[in-house]
Image: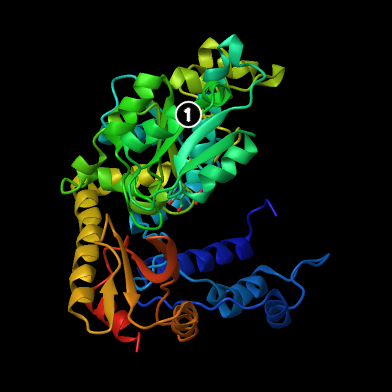
Amino acid sequence: MHKIDLGLVEMTMDVMKYAIDRISATDRKIGKPLKAEELKKLVGETITDKGIGGENAFNLWKQHLAAANVPVDHPRNLAFVPAAPTKAAIMFDLVTSASSIHGAYWMEGAGGIYCENEAMHWMVSLTGLPEGAFGVFTSGGTAANLSALVTAREHWRENESNRGKKGLMITSSGAHSSVKAMAKVIDVDVLLVESEEALQGGSLQQTISELSITERQRLFAIVATGGTTNAGIIDDLEGIAQVCEDENLWFHVDAAYGGGALVADSVRHLFNGIERANSITIDPHKWMFSPYDCGAVIYREPQLAKNAHSQQGSYLDIFKDEGAHGFNPADYQIQLTRRVRGLPLWFSLAMHGVDRYKKAVERGLELAQIAGKMIEAHPDVELVRAPSLSCVLYRRIGWEPEDYTEWTYENHRKGFALVTPTKYKTGDTYETVSRFCFINPDTTEKDIELILNSMH
Ligand SMILES: Cc1ncc(COP(=O)(O)O)c(C=O)c1O
């Protein structure tokens, strides 16, 4: 398995050819998921004592398994938060794998971590955080939110009177599910401010003032959202920052999806106040065109993250030695062994430059505006709210929730598009509506038109 022979070289060439074809493909198919039993029937036993052989296994992948995936970079995949990694980033993802770099400590991964840090300096500069702020790449937004919240909670507990208390944090109902899920992981309570629209500093202040004395003592963090997943809404970051400063609370901004738009001059002002955050989540695998998986967490005071996350063990002492000095990503987030997952972003940024990123993100924003206008001009559909960032919520006049579901499945079955329904609260009721999220700059106006026209 570890020796090089002719067979292995041939196999490597086959796999490389497949990767090249996939990287340069212009006509990707939207695959269909099959049940696990159906896939088993198609491919049979694949794990055996003697192995089925590389060629065989690869053929099964090509013939049956690859087609059971929906490529996130398909131009008519507008569901959830899709992705569109640059070709350069994908290429360097291959290099990252081939290079076998342990990305936890500078001692082993200096070259890779140096590149990650170059990309990170750029990301930090987008936030406007002061000198000294820095961050690390994580497996995604969930891990970034978790790393930030652990840091916040540990910092709060540095105060002796908070030890042993169960923490409480406040966020809005529009916050991503991972915020609530990670609160469970760290066993803190979450108070949700009900608001489908942006969380305002005023209503946050009101909520805090209504807490009991014990609840107020347990409150340690506020999580604002810099682009909600459902509707692209950016909370009132200035107002929330002010409340956090007045109340001495940790201010975390989850910009996992929206953070990519910090580079876009047309909307940068909407994020004003983000530079006052204690920590920020941004997912390069969303709107910074990195392949999965690549999230990031940035801290105003990285030392606080180090206090919370740095692992101790006699086998790890060597990394703290003078000779190994450098930036150790393991100290700033929840993971020890890690891939240098920021490397593909670095290569793509270095190759193309920041201006190309600006342009690609601006195109996503523009597509949302174009879709908004097309919806307004279309007799069968109407906007639920004005497009925000690259999210567009709209209704098909006269449709019931099951019509949206059936339409989604029908488009998926045909391999035409992946556009999924969501719910939006208008007044007191949740309405099922359709949603676009634009990331891929290759999505065209024709794609949008075809999708809208398919809602007969
Ligand atoms: C605002 C927000 N936060 C967090 C996440 C979770 O990120 P990940 O799926 O990379 O863990 C998402 C994912 O869509 C998101 O949109």
Determine if residue 56 is in view.
yes
- From the viewer's side, name the closer residue of 152 and 213: 213
Q: Quadrant of residue 105?
A: top right
Tell me how many marks there are: 1
Decide: is 48 above or below 86. below
Residue at the outermost right position: 49
What residue did someone put label 1 on? 221
Q: Quadrant of the C terminus?
A: bottom left
Residue at the outermost bottom position: 456
Where is residue 265 shown, x and y percent of the image? 16, 45
In terms of secondary structure, where does tag 1 sit? strand
Residue at x 60%, y 79% (from the top left corner)? 64
Residue at x 51%, y 43% (from the top left corner)? 179
Residue at x 49%, y 38% (from the top left corner)? 145
Where is residue 270 shown, x and y percent of the image? 23, 43
Residue at x 52%, y 14% (from the top left corner)? 323
- From the viewer's side, name the closer residue of 127 and 405: 405
Kindly identify the amino acid type of the residue bearing the numbered disc 1: Ala
* Residue 268 appears left or right of 415: left
Q: Is mark 1 within 8 Å of ligand 1?
A: no
**Dot 1 surroundings within 10 Å: few (below 14), some, or many (20 or more)?**
many
Where is residue 451 shown, x and y percent of the image? 32, 80
Applied colour scheme: rainbow
Q: Quadrant of the N terminus?
A: bottom right
* Residue 92 appears left or right of 67: left
- From the viewer's side, name the closer residue of 379 and 60: 379
Determine if residue 123 is in view.
no
Where is residue 72 shown, x and y percent of the image? 43, 65
Q: Quadrant of residue 54?
A: bottom right
